[in-house]
Image (cartoon, rainbow, N blue to C red):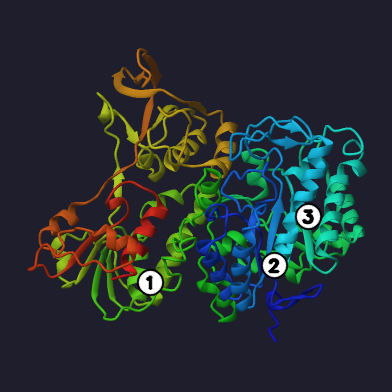
Amino acid sequence: MHDDPLLQPYQLKHLTLRNRLMVTSHEPAYPEDGMPKARYRAYHVERARAGLALTMTAGSASVARDSPPVFNNILAWKDEVVGWLRELADECHGHGCAVMIQLTHLGRRTRWDKADWLPVVSAGHAREPAHRAFPKKAEDWDIARIIGNYADAAERMKAAGLDGIELEAYGHLMDQFWSPLTNHLDAPWGGSLDDRLRFTFETLQAIRDRVGPEFIVGIRYSGDEGLPGGLTKADGLEISRRLKASGLVDFLNVVRGHIDTDAGLTDVIPVQGMRSAPHLDFAGEIRAATDFPTFHAAKIQDVATARHAIASGKLDMVGMTRAHMADPHIVAKILAGEEDRIRPCVGANYCLDRIYQGGAAFCLHNPATGRELTMPHAVPKAAAARRVVVVGAGPAGLEAARVAALRGHAVTVHEAAKDPGGQIRLTARTPRRQEMIQVVQWRFAECERLGVAFRFNSFADGEAVLAADPEVVIVATGGLPHTEVLAEGDGLVVSAWDILSGDAQPGSNVLIYDDAGDYAALQAAEKIAATGARVEIMTRDRSFAPEVMAMSLTPSMRELQKRDVTFTVTWRLEAVRRDGNELLAIIGSDYGGVTRERRVDQVVVNHGTRPLDDVYFELKEASSNRGEVDYEALVAGRPQAVLRNPEGRFQLFRIGDAVAARNTHAAIYDALRLVKDL
């Protein structure tokens, strides 16, 4: 028997959960045709196999046709879902892990132009800022129909052999009935708290009538909307007590806040640079007030915090959802006494931000997550050891070295700087983004453990690389900022990197021309604005910082708006001229026919990077493949066998920004995908 509080079993009705760690319901957007097929199953099974107690699928599986998914959710209103979920549940059960699902009707949190073009429905006409749809106010027949849809969906979940369900009641239709801000119906469905809760309790009763008293049913809800005129903490405590007293639910899964805006959503599910576990104490208050099984998740990204949540009696089950995307093997590592080897969630939120833009969830620094069918979480040994030289110790180079070492190869890494990290070292200089350095620290520690040889302060040219008589050379030298985008005046501008590194001091009246749309411009703006300078960020795009995405933008916007930074879209910087002590910026537009001028004392250009590829081209002719990559083999997971130069003694590859400016995830994925087959 373990004395670790996290490893104690938990009894929920008839269900014994083997420890206190769970993955809360989330939708990684992996369904195919609305069904959780092989890819979806593999993702959950990976975590089940590693010892997780409870995996919850489907952040908001849709119970009705007029709740069309906004990010590829599971369609729980189709009978076909039963077979797919049964396969998923059976396989997870085979590894000792319980499986539940979240059911919902999105209400106004979707769009009328999705799927079947049915009107969006809510408890009133109030529009949700995030999805911008004006809803129809529910009629009696809508309410009766949707209650029936919930009961049907619950019955399907029981038929699939799941261990339980939870209903989603924050920001979705149930909460739209609860909140005075969104419920504009008359009695019996609106007005008093009793009437606003009626829809939920009638739905719960209809579900119980269908699935019986034993099947586990919970609810995930906001116990305090944190909005003027919305549900208060007092309301939340009262609702919690009523849920328990009803006898219709078996657990409470508590959140705090509202999700109708990007900023609200980010406060419910905090990202990098925000406080860890901000709602944990609140969840503990709900548990203390109700003495009822309480689950919770929100930026509980490390094991110590999770352990505290259980040991202090705040929670019964603790959700580490994004943490399990970064490392699905958390429980296995705790059991093996290797907690220090857990790959840390750095709060980059690439996972969630991607789904809200219509993509699939990927982890910034674990490219195997969501790709379990093709990428290994545990890298297998190669048949034969080879000598591998990696040039560059940024995220791509470190990942290449780590994976090559796990394959059993002898690995040497050359890095021109005195420390590993590449561009991430610059990113981490912004205080609220310092968690990013863990992407580097974790890889460096793993490489050292695996015996990788590092050569720092080593500007490796072709000769230095070949001195080790390598059989494989991987160039991961990254890129350098490219600022030459003007018709005239390129020499008068500085790069966002110059500002972040301290090579250029911030001006007092600054124009930042952002033609890449990524973090560098925002971080430079933060650093400059913090000095009290006047800052304008200009872009030719229709929206600013499009690569940064919604939730990650929130902490940045709070900082920049506080400092009165201006954003200007749809304008293009064409030229910069010196004029006395000032710079004259000439502004044009892709829409044509207009010019403007700005007088400033500094122009910062953010235009991505250009590859630092000298050593690659120096080695190219001598290599056996002449740098060529067989894309078909790469994607199919076969070794690279291109032979263009039979005399060549080594294969040559380049990865990450040494190929073209992309992002951290792309760089790390490049490395894993290539090196796992070397």
Snapshot quadrant of residue 559: top right
Q: x, y percentage for residue 239?
A: 87, 50
Badge 1 crowding class, 10 Å Cα cut-off, few under 14, some 14 to 19, many 20 or more, is many
- Give the SS element for disc 1: helix
Q: x, y percentage for residue 236?
A: 84, 49
- Give the SS element for disc 2: loop
Give the distance between the C-alpha atoms of the residues marked 2 and 3, in whole angstroms: 15 Å
In this view, 621 is above or below 379 = above
- Give the SS element for disc 3: helix
**Circle 2 or circle 1, nearest the eye:** 2
Residue that numbered label 1 is attached to: 447
Residue that numbered label 3 is attached to: 151
Q: Are marks 3 and 1 in contact (CB under 8 Å)?
A: no
Q: Which amino acid does the dot numbered 3 rest on?
A: Ala
Quadrant, the N terminus: bottom right
Q: Nearer the viewer, residue 265 or 436?
A: 265
In this view, 28 is above or below 609 = below
Give the distance between the C-alpha atoms of the residues marked 3 and 1, in whole angstroms: 52 Å
Q: Which amino acid does the dot numbered 1 rest on?
A: Cys
Residue 162: give its label: 2
Q: Earlier in the sequence, mark 2 or mark 1?
A: 2
Residue 598: give its label: none
In this view, 101 is above or below 591 = below
Q: x, y percentage for residue 374?
A: 41, 65
